[in-house]
Image: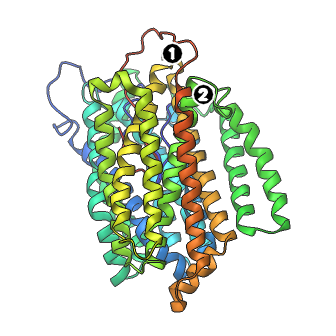
């Protein structure tokens, strides 16, 4: 099955191992990704990635204002984790759908569902409908991400795929720079709803551009016999497991929002669904950090969960505690998006191959330092600019750690296991986001942070409830990152073994559609 990584606005569509595929032209034929046969398709799919990337960066900027306006700060974390929960299920469904029916239907369906989710969120009159809109967005994003991988694998020859993936990665740079400023300006002058409502109109152009080219590529693949005959013989067991994980995670998140005795019932049901399904979807020993591949898979979820759980609360902290505008609060995260690329570049140097495990440990340590550094903004005497400086450090750490984890995963996978292990990496990434962002929301609400933040936004002044809630969230996520650093030594197998046919510098997996940059 072709798989994909899970979205901040999730695993991002720039994975060079996204699909086996076959060349759509003879390998010797000249021309690049913008040459005649590929120009429309390249521009179309890169435009889709650009819109998803912009939406991902814009959400962090608009979310504090949206939650305040809808009187839903208690559900603030659920608006993030709900996206990841549904995208996890959608990625598994999309992989099966693409393998059996081709990528065109899931891609276009995913774009339509993603746009529908934006409309639901942008027109919501309460926080629960807003969370529902974010969940619908997650469904669409999960379908799109996997389908884009399959498109690249089937429509482009092998020699052009690295260029397409490089274009995907580049599509995240511009939104990381201008996304917070544009979203903040729109939020302050037109209202937060337009951050969501403007994007559905923009998806019409890439659909119109790439639709005919994608139909031609799919038709040519069938004529050559590259694409399998259409079938609805899906792997229902895998879909059932993904559904159990998603429902279980959703019940746990709902229980975390209640914080009363009745919450024990959905919490128990959620755990009963989640744990058995996760153990079947992930390699044996993952949850107990067994040496080698299981710990490598686990590290992906630890890294993504700690970093993005902290990042989700930074704009809210800056708006409510330091009274920054949404624009400035969002811009504080831009530095992380840029330095993530630097960290990925550093780990990709030839000399880094000998120090892969050390780079993972260093990446986790830098991430922990960044989260702790961002928490210093809770001290009034410390300039709020410390967040941007800290997040620049965190971006380097995440670029080093996440990319190195992906390279190790590929090097520890036999050729016929690479797809399943890539899927496990993505599932763990999504679960890390779901569980740790959800935990952050529970801690913040339990300590009175949501109520105090709402009072602060209403002009009542800052209070220890809000400050303490933020402090505990950042302290816990710092501890999680330090735990990752401590466990990083277990990424080394107990007895090293060579895997025939796997190159040492195998391509790496990208982070969540909502991650700022990838390999």
Mark carried by residue 294:
2
Q: x and y percent of residue 225 in the render?
A: 41, 21
Residue at image coords 40%, 81%: 191
**In which quadrant of the rendered view does residue 222 lie?**
top left
Residue at image coords 28%, 43%: 342
Q: SS of the residue at dot 1?
A: loop
Q: From the viewer's perspective, is residue 78 above or below residue 392?
A: below
Residue at image coords 41%, 46%: 366
**Residue extending furthest front?**
381
Observer-nearest residue: 95 or 254? 254
**In which quadrant of the rendered view does residue 421 lie?**
top right
Residue on which disc 1 sits: 414
How crowded pointer 1 is (Cα within 10 Å; few <14, some 14-19, many 20+) is rated as some
Indicate which label's residue lies in the foreground, 1 or 2. 2
Q: x and y percent of residue 276 in the render?
A: 76, 37
Q: SS of the residue at dot 2?
A: helix
Q: x and y percent of residue 450 in the render?
A: 61, 75
Q: Earlier in the sequence, mark 1 or mark 2?
A: 2
Rendered-image quadrant of the C terminus: top left
């Amino acid at each position: 099955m072709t798989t994909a990584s899970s979205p901040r606005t999730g695993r991002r569509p720039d994975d060079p191992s996204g699909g086996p595929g076959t060349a759509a032209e003879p390998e010797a034929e000249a021309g690049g990704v913008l040459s005649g046969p590929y120009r429309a398709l390249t521009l179309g799919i890169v435009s889709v990635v650009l819109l998803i990337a912009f939406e991902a960066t814009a959400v962090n900027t608009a979310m504090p204002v949206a939650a305040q306006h809808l009187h839903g700060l208690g559900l603030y974390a659920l608006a993030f984790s709900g996206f990841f929960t549904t995208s996890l299920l959608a990625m598994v469904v999309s992989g099966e759908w693409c393998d059996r029916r081709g990528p065109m239907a899931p891609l276009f369906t995913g774009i339509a569902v993603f746009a529908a989710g934006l409309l639901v969120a942008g027109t919501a009159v309460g926080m629960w409908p807003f969370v529902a809109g974010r969940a619908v967005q997650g469904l669409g994003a999960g379908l799109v991400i996997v389908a884009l991988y399959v498109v690249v694998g089937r429509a482009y020859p092998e020699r052009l795929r690295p260029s397409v993936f490089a274009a995907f990665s580049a599509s995240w740079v511009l939104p990381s720079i201008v996304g917070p400023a544009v979203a903040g300006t729109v939020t302050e002058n037109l209202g937060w709803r337009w951050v969501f409502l403007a994007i559905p109109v923009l998806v019409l152009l890439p659909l119109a551009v790439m639709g005919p080219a994608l139909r031609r590529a799919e038709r040519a693949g069938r004529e050559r016999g590259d694409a399998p005959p259409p079938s609805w013989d899906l792997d229902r067991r895998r879909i059932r497991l993904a559904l159990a994980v998603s429902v279980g995670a959703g019940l746990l998140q709902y229980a975390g929002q209640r914080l009363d005795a009745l919450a024990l019932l959905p919490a128990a049901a959620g755990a009963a669904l989640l744990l058995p399904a996760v153990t079947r979807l992930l390699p044996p020993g993952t949850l107990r950090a067994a040496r080698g591949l299981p710990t490598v898979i686990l590290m992906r979820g630890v890294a993504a969960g700690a970093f993005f759980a902290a990042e989700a609360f930074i704009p809210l902290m800056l708006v409510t505690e330091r009274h920054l505008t949404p624009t400035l609060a969002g811009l504080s995260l831009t530095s992380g998006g840029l330095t993530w690329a630097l960290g990925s570049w550093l780990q990709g140097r030839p000399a880094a191959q000998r120090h892969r495990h050390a780079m993972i440990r260093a990446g986790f340590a830098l991430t922990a330092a960044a989260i702790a550094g961002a928490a210093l903004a809770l001290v009034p005497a410390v300039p709020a600019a410390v967040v941007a400086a800290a997040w620049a450090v965190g971006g380097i750490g995440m670029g080093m750690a996440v990319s190195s984890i992906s390279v190790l995963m590929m090097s520890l996978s036999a050729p016929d296991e690479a797809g399943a292990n890539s899927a496990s990496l993505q599932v763990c990434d999504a679960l890390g986001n779901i569980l740790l962002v959800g935990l952050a929301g529970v801690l913040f609400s339990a300590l009175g942070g949501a109520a105090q933040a709402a009072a602060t936004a209403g002009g009542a002044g800052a209070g220890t409830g809000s400050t303490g809630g933020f402090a505990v969230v950042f302290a816990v996520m710092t501890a999680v990152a330090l735990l990752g650093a401590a466990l990083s030594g277990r990424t080394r197998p107990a007895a090293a073994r060579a895997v025939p046919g796997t190159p040492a510098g195998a391509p790496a997996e990208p982070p969540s559609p909502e991650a700022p940059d990838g390999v």
